[in-house]
Amino acid sequence: MFETIVALATPPAKSALAIIRMSGDDCFKVVSNIFTKDLTKVKEKGIHYGYIKEGEKNIDQVVLLTYVAPHSFTGENSVEIITHGSMLIVNQIIAALLKNGARMATNGEFSSRAFLNGKIDLVQAEAINDMINATTIEAKDLSMVSLTGETSKVFKPIKDKIGEILSHIEVNIDYPEYEDIEETSKEEILQKCGEIIGNIEDLIKDGEKNRMYRDGIKIAIVGKPNVGKSSLLNALIKEDKAIVTAIPGTTRDVVEGDFNLAGVPVHLYDTAGIRESNDVIEQIGIDKAKKAVENADLVLFIVDETGIDNEMYSLIKNQKHIIVNNKADIISKKENGSLYISAKNNDVAPLLEKIKEELNIGEVVIKPTFNNTRQLGILKQMVFYLKNAIDDTNNNQPIDLISVSIMAAYNCALDLLGQNNKNDLTDEIFSRFCVGK
Ligand SMILES: Nc1nc2c(ncn2[C@@H]2O[C@H](COP(=O)(O)OP(=O)(O)OP(=O)(O)O)[C@@H](O)[C@H]2O)c(=O)[nH]1
Ligand SMILES: [Mg+2]
């Protein structure tokens, strides 16, 4: 028995319309207490027009959609109330529903119920959240593939293959007198585990690559004062965000900006120019700049006509970085093979190409991928267990010991799709969702 939950599914702001969402066994009964029509006998999906009432008073004129279990997103009886988009109205209606037996949904509770009721697996549930959070079309398209269940489908044969090995081992343990079975099993383990590892490693490779589209990348812009760091941030995000002046030491705090690089969301950090300084504020800024370097996936080391500062370069040289010569418009002597741009003139195209090359950003291939930390972590764990199984087999370990590793890999496969200990996982994963989702 699922309690009836309610939440606003649209943003809490003035708009043309708002949608209040409900789910749970009793939701038709709860809503009927405050609606002009009796919906308690509803047997099929429908659209109902009427008034939400509090006693005799009309709260709003609404359109109400009913979904009858199991044919709904959550798999339970569900209602969507389309109201006028005023937060006054929304709050009044939600308060009335709470008074009549519903309770407020927690973050992601609708999706979590869809998962618990077997309407979607965990990879699909995560894709819903990723879709909402995507900031580029490419990231959204990748999530869409997982949302439809395509990604889970790709994984199913891998899970089944591991299950198959386990069942053969089971036969072996149950009938140890047939030695020939054991022989076949060991060969089978080596061959099949090797094959599965190959399949999983391909998935990891695609996932790591596409992870950039989901999580974005962090790029820090650093260098001496006045070399044009803030000008570069402004040129890249195409907005006059950071203050630019000819006075060295203009930027104090870290200035952040976002832009879309061939579908990859890039988070930029423009930092204070690094130099010896007695100014307390500037010194804090410089410390922040050093932190930004540590956290970055890529560092742009900006140099102007005054040349490179070797001491400063030693701060970043062990990190993935690009040396960028700025102010190309006033530099007369250019070295072959070096990268030149002019941030002031928005002449930054060669840098964008270089970043793409450095981070291996090409044309995105929209295909099923496991690209979040949880999914990739599980896949790597599976490879680890299957390699153990291969080592144990090669070392002539007893078959029941080998099967422990294969069983562990199988459990990982169940975890990936959320087929293991459903209840433990939901809190952790669904808490990252919005309310109403
Ligand atoms: N000629 C030329 N001048 C530039 C270029 N980029 C920036 N400048 C100038 O260089 C000066 C400093 O630019 P900023 O972008 O503020 O430099 P910064 O590295 O952020 O400086 P701090 O914040 O002080 O560390 C300004 O006068 C800019 O107009 C460029 O490509 N060419
Ligand atoms: Mg600056």
Image: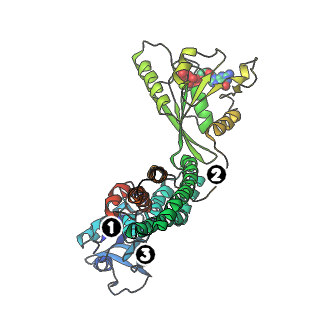
Q: Nearer the viewer, mark 2 or mark 1?
A: 2
Q: Where is the C terminus found, in terms of image quarters?
A: bottom left
Q: CA distance from mark 3 to mark 2?
A: 33 Å
Q: Quadrant of residue 285?
A: top left
Viewer can see residue 215 = yes
Residue located beneath label 2 in the image: 364
Q: Nearer the viewer, mark 3 or mark 2?
A: 2
Q: Quadrant of residue 129?
A: bottom left
Q: Earlier in the sequence, mark 3 or mark 1?
A: 1
Residue 120: x %, y % from top left: 44, 68
Q: CA distance from mark 2 to mark 1?
A: 39 Å
Q: Is residue 84 left or right of residue 302?
A: left
Q: Earlier in the sequence, mark 3 or mark 2?
A: 3
Q: Nearer the viewer, mark 3 or mark 1?
A: 3
Q: Quadrant of residue 408?
A: bottom left
Specify the amino acid type for callout 1.
Val
Specify the amino acid type for callout 3.
Ser
Specify the amino acid type for callout 2.
Val
- What numbered label is drawn on residue 360? none
Residue located beneath label 3 in the image: 72
SS at badge 1: strand
Residue behind label 1 places its C-beta within 8 angstroms of ligand 2: no
Ligand 1 falls in which quarter?
Answer: top right
SS at badge 3: loop
Question: How is colour applied across the structure in the image?
Answer: rainbow
Asked if 67 appears above or below 303 in the picture, the reply is below
Residue located beneath label 1 in the image: 6
